[in-house]
Amino acid sequence: MSAKRFQNRVAESRMALPVTGLYAVVVCLCCGFLERQMWLPMVLLALNSFLMLELNNSNALIRVYSRMVSCSYIVLAVMASFLLSSVRDGAFQMFFVTFFLLLFRAYQDKAAVGLVFYAFMMFGMASTLFAQLLYFLPVVWILLFTNIMAGSVRTFAASLLGLLMPYWCIGGYCLYTGDIDSLVARVSELWQFAPLFDFESLGPVSYTHLRAHET
């Protein structure tokens, strides 16, 4: 048997995830998360890392112990440390990863109405934070019938109900408070796009720039 290469030993090591988690904590400390009492972004980072871990465990294609999916997510997340300060971005990631986690569990089960409903409810909640996500909805429906192989009349109806559930709640709250403009502004975000090839945010990140991305 040939000796394992260094990258194989790292990928299969049980210390990879704890070391990467410690690295993320150090980055958060260096960015001043504790000084600014940014506990919620740190909790969302930890929760999203756990969800990525569960997603990897539930859909592993090879019988090899590896935590590289979660480790890669953590490294990529802390590379853009100015995004970690945004609670909205962290919540969007949580909803989107949960969507895939629930959707994949409905694999080849055309009677998985509940799973599909909750999966698309997560998709709808994510779209309330990033409206342009709705442009991917036709692709997701195609994958539901083809790759996930859980498409049926019942699951399609469940996906519609789940998708609309967050908007029903938000719409009802806006009608109750009389703040219809917020609902209109939320829907109008579908036609709002950032400038193409805008690389200004890739420059050196200052403390002022970090505060500008906080929500």
Image (cartoon, rainbow, N blue to C red):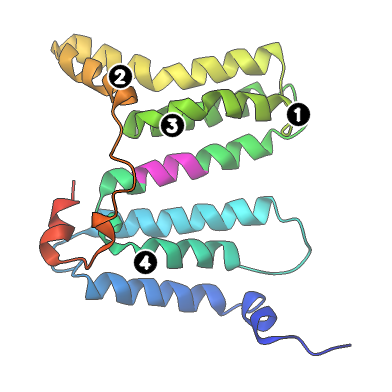
Q: Which mark is residue 113?
A: none
| Residue bearing mark 4 | 79
Identify the element where label 4 is drawn: helix
Q: Which residues are magenta?
A: 91-97
Whether residues under marks 1 and 2 lie with C-beta atoms below 8 angstroms apart, the answer is: no
Q: Write the residue at 14% across / 10% down.
A: 178
Tag 2: amino acid: Val
Q: Reading the chain from its start, which is encountered first: label 2 or label 3?
A: 3
Q: Nearer the viewer, mark 1 or mark 2?
A: 2
Q: Reading the chain from its start, which is encountered first: label 3 or label 1?
A: 3
Q: Residues within 10 Å of mark 3 (few under 14, many from 20)?
A: some
Q: Write the residue at 33% across / 42% down.
A: 196
Could you tell me residue 84's position as x and y percent? 30, 57
Q: CA distance from mark 2 to mark 3?
A: 12 Å
Quadrant the N terminus occupies: bottom right
Q: CA distance from mark 3 to mark 1?
A: 22 Å
Tag 1: amino acid: Met
Q: Write the residue at 31% across / 23% down.
A: 191
| Residue bearing mark 2 | 187
Q: CA distance from mark 4 to mark 2?
A: 31 Å
Identify the element where label 2 is drawn: helix
